[in-house]
Amino acid sequence: MESVTRWATEWADINEASAITGVPVATLRSWRWRRLGEGPESFTVGRRIRYRRDAIEAWMRQQEAAGTSAGAA
């Protein structure tokens, strides 16, 4: 049971990734389809798209840093 709980806390599906990032599911799918390196890293398990929660957090930090103005407090 512990491995199932651990899996549920370490991985997110596309709907959860959308909720966490605020990026629509359709946009996340488009980024994966275009394979331009946009969005958080993801992979598939069968036909399901999965995201590591730490990859989502890292991507969000990158977005924050990229959107921070120079000299902002």
Image (cartoon, rainbow, N blue to C red):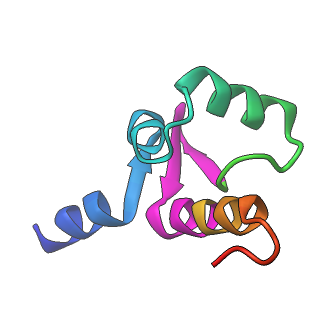
Q: Quadrant of the N terminus?
A: bottom left
- What residue is at 54 percent from the left and 59 percent from the top? 56
State the residue in front, 53 or 72. Answer: 72
Taking the magenta stretch, the answer to whether it contains residue 57 is yes
Please say whether residue 60 is one of the residues in the magenta stretch: no
Image vertical order of residue 42 relative to residue 13, above or below: below
Query: Vertically, is 5 above or below 18?
Result: below
Residue span colored magenta: 42-59
Which residue sits at x=71%, y=69%? 65
Q: Name the side, left or right, on which 27 lies relative to 25.
A: right
Q: Residue at x 70, y 47 (%)?
A: 39
- Left/right placement of residue 36 relative to residue 42 reads right
**Residue 43 placement, left or right of 47:** right
User: Can you name the residue that lies furthest to the top here?
Assistant: 26
Which sits in the foreground, 72 or 39? 72
Name the foreground residue: 12 vs 3: 12
Q: Nearer the viewer, residue 53 or 69?
A: 69
Vertical position of residue 73 compared to residue 27: above or below: below
Residue 31 occupies quadrant: top right
Q: Quadrant of residue 23?
A: top right
Q: Position of residue 7 (x, y in %)?
A: 30, 63
Residue 26 position in % (x across, y down): 61, 20
Q: Position of residue 24 (x, y in %)?
A: 55, 26
Q: Is residue 42 left or right of residue 14?
A: right
- The residue located at (54%, 26%) in the rendering is 25
Q: Quadrant of the C terminus?
A: bottom right
Which image quarter: residue 67? bottom right
Number of numbered labels in the structure image = 0
